[in-house]
Image (tube, rainbow, N blue to C red):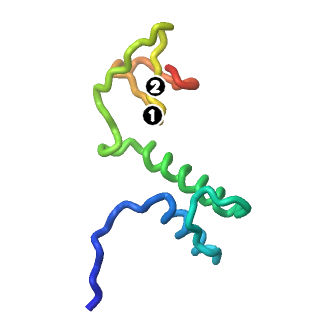
């Protein structure tokens, strides 16, 4: 009888190796290997899909009522891991430009 390991999140290295194996390439030991263009393509694809999934606005990747303070330059700086901001006032259309609203 096979012992099943509990399901855990994949590391980026595991995800890259999965994609490499799916196209018949050898797995790698380091994400920063040089000379293998498929590695950078796989990493870009993983990051793109991750952004798409996170942008869906599922309950587990949202923070409601998160206050964004004004900077000393009177700007609202958005955290670097933010993909989308909605104002509590729905009549306002907010756009992230660079690092600020």
Name the foreground residue: 7 vs 55. 7
Residue 82, numbered label: 1
* Residue for badge 2: 78
In percent of the image, x 52 and y 53: which residue is there?
Answer: 49
Point out the image quarter for the N terminus. bottom left
Q: Quadrant of residue 91?
A: top left
User: Above or below — where is 11 with respect to 22?
Assistant: above
- Label 1 neighbour load within 10 Å: few <14, some 14-19, many 20+: few
Give the CA distance from mark 1 to mark 2. 7 Å
User: Above or below — where is 28 with respect to 12?
Assistant: below
Name the foreground residue: 17 vs 100. 17
Name the foreground residue: 58 vs 21. 21
- As helix, strand or loop, the secondary structure at mark 1 comes to loop
User: Above or below — where is 46 with respect to 79?
Assistant: below
User: Above or below — where is 11 with respect to 50?
Assistant: below
In percent of the image, x 65 and y 58: which residue is there?
Answer: 41
Judged from this view, the residue extending furthest toward the bottom is 1
7 left or right, relative to 79: left
Q: Quadrant of residue 82?
A: top left
Q: Quadrant of residue 81?
A: top left
Residue 101, numbered label: none
- Residue 75: % across, % down: 48, 12
Mark 1 and mark 2 residues within 8 Å of each other at the beta carbon: yes
In percent of the image, x 58 and y 72: which residue is there?
Answer: 27
- Residue 97: % across, % down: 57, 24
In percent of the image, x 48 and y 51: which residue is there?
Answer: 50
User: Number of marks in the image?
Assistant: 2
101 left or right, relative to 86: right
- Residue 23: % across, % down: 63, 74
- As helix, strand or loop, the secondary structure at mark 2 comes to loop
Judged from this view, the residue extending furthest toward the right is 35
- Label 2 neighbour load within 10 Å: few <14, some 14-19, many 20+: some
């Amino acid at each position: 009888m096979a012992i099943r390991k509990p399901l855990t999140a994949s590391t980026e290295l595991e995800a890259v190796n999965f994609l490499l194996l799916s196209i018949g390439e050898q797995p790698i030991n380091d994400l920063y290997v040089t000379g293998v263009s498929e590695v950078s393509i796989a990493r870009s694809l993983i990051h793109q899909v991750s952004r798409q999934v996170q942008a869906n606005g599922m309950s587990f990747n949202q923070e409601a009522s998160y206050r964004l303070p004004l900077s000393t330059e009177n700007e609202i700086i958005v955290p670097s891991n933010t993909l989308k901001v909605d104002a509590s006032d729905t009549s306002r259309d907010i756009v992230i430009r660079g690092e600020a609203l």
